[in-house]
Image: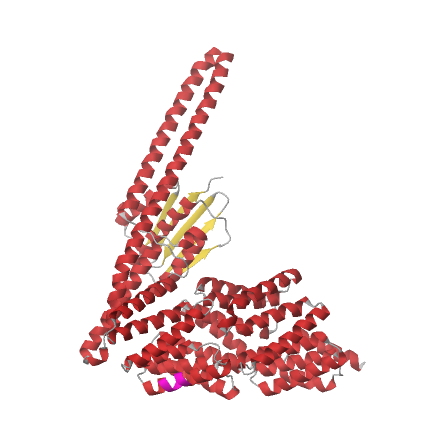
Amino acid sequence: MKKEVIFLLLLTLRLSAQNTDSLLRILPKMPADTHRVRILVDLGKNLWIEGKDSVALQYLTQAVTLSQKINFGRGEAEARLQLVRMERDNMSNVEAAYAHLDVVDKLAKKLNDKYIEAFSLIRRAHMYEPNFQKQKAISSLLAKAQQIVTEIHNPELQSYIYEREALQLMNQARNAEAVDRMLQAKRLQEQYRDLRIRRSSVGNLGVFFLSVNKYDDALKAFNEASAIATKLHDPRAEAHIASYQGEILEQKHRYAEALVADKKAVEILEKIKGYGKLPRSYARLGSVYIELKEYDKALKYSQMAADLFNKTNGGETMQHLSQINFGKIYLIQKNYGKVVEKAKEGLSWALQNDPPLMAEAAEYNRQLSIAYDKLGQPQKAIVHFKQYKAESDSILNNEALQKITVSSMTYEFEKKQEGDKIHIKTLENEQLAQTRNILIGLSVLGVLGLIFVLWSNRKLKSKNEQLKNKNREIEEALFKGQNIERKRVASELHDNLNTKLAAVRWHLEAMQAEDFNAFNQKIHSRLIDMANDVYADVRLISHNMLPAELETHGLVSALQKLVEKLNVNTKTVFHLVANAAQKRPPSQVEHQLYNIALELVNNVLKHAQASEVWISLSQTATQLTLTVSDNGVGMPTEIQSDGIGMRNLQSRVDVLAGHLTLDSTPEIGTKVSVEIPIPA
């Protein structure tokens, strides 16, 4: 009876979130069997999450010893994998972690346990992440784990693979893909009631949103992660969240609040001896002190970050945030020799990483270009500035955005295309009339006439088919011609105007503003802001012309990117309602609808004075509908019927044989719907 009670209690704990106090109460009642091992492993996980590493180590060591004694290989493997996870945070005895993984691999092979085999590969990939010399092995480890997980269909392990892949994508500056992959991980982990499974993915999702300047989404993810951390009594996660909240506040120039958040993260990590994450928090604190112009403190915390990172990682990699801080501080102090020393060292490490760390490399090249210029070495300054510019553009274009223009050339092409369609329609009507006349005449001739009609119809169908094929060829040629010209104009914008704007911005930033009086400093700061705004506007305009997302992933993805950009760069809040899984229409239809959406969005931003805009895209078997609505001031009656913008919109809709509907009410808003038939 006692064993049955213990079994039922254990089953209840396994099916719910295991509370540490509950586990500690049941442990003394457990015999030395496999159930006791599982309780010991769960205790080790919980206590580690709660920041009690030394106690967690004791229970996990007991789990390993007991597993070996009762020959419970699966329990020993799970305990060792948790010990590896703990070491990944501390990075104080990496060789011990690798030794644990080697034992786990042997146990998995002996037991033919695919779950443990895959989990060991994922943990090894996790251990390799801070070491650039082992970066190349990560992809192959995850690929092997993926093969096994595909075979055993385990959502938990699949989510862990997605997490690791997301971090690799982020390192490659493929931010949107990284966010998507982390969302996949989160969706899989939400199937489980055990909050420990998704303690890291939610926080990392916030980090990824932060990397693409989606601050609201980042804060939402951090709030969710904070709730999980509170339930799990997880100080590491609390420190992680506080650190990135500090980064958001720093990005928003709220430095005093950022300082409070970063100090909170440092205080927690110092208390629990979280040496794996502490260097980043020290470096973030140093970054805030730079903005507060407390350079001695900035240098102190940056040096603490570098020293601790080197100690925990054995000099196998570099803490780039602290290294970048050094360069910024020495630039301000006009110690250009030290800038060159630190930036060259950091650049070498950043480029040796696999994949190269482009954001860090760009910042190092920026620092080197300024330092060499001040040292009177203009050739080296130019070389590093060009590298900085190339790397910056690579980062800003990490989603492979391709740009086009809505120039007069586009308008002429579309007019020509419309004229060709009218001409072809006239030919079709003339031939239909000819067919009717022939049928009337041949009806008198009887059978011979009927034979002639059949022959004539066959011939006419052939000609009509030829005309339709020719029409398609003309449309495709025009479409290709438009794209070629758009890309050419976009290239001119990028290579000339954008480069010159960047040069102006760089020269402004390179000026020693601290030598100016307060009035001139204010003017200098405003000029930098204006240069940044113009640079961002040019980039946004060129991107909105035709992103590569439209070519590769379709209209829904392109509209999503447009909404994300608009929400970053405008005060109006844009929403997109669309089904990403819907079938893609023909390419020409997608391009026309995207241009229509741009025209409507532009009208809203110019005239509507709206706070919110909704873009909706829906599809049935025979029809595609695009709707743009706002809560603005409405559209005057004369513009609704006779405005140039509305005539342009109607022209685009007519090209697609569609129907445009406009509904506008003063002080309530405007709704424009475009319905396009889909060919069968």
Question: Which quarter of the figure has residue 656?
Answer: top left
Determine whether 51 is above or below 619 in the image: below
* Horizontal relation, residue 342 to residue 169: left or right: left
For the N terminus, the quadrant is bottom right
The image quarter in which residue 339 lies: bottom left
Residue 17 in view of the camera: no
Residue 280 in the image, given as x and y percentages of width and height: 44, 79
Majority secondary structure of magenta residues: helix
Which image quarter: residue 342?
A: bottom left
Check the image and report above or below for 284 versus 654. Answer: below
Q: Nearer the viewer, residue 235 or 61?
A: 61
Coordinates of residue 276 in the picture (x, y in percent): 50, 81
From the viewer's side, name the closer residue of 176 and 636. 176
Which residue sits at x=42%, y=69%? 351
Extent of the magenta region: 299-303
Identify the residue at image location x=38%, y=87%. Answer: 300
Q: Position of residue 457 (x, y in %)?
A: 46, 22
Whether residue 262 can be seen here: yes
237 falls in the magenta region: no
- Is 511 situated left or right of 565 in this image? left
In the rendering, at what x and y percent does residue 49 appear?
57, 81
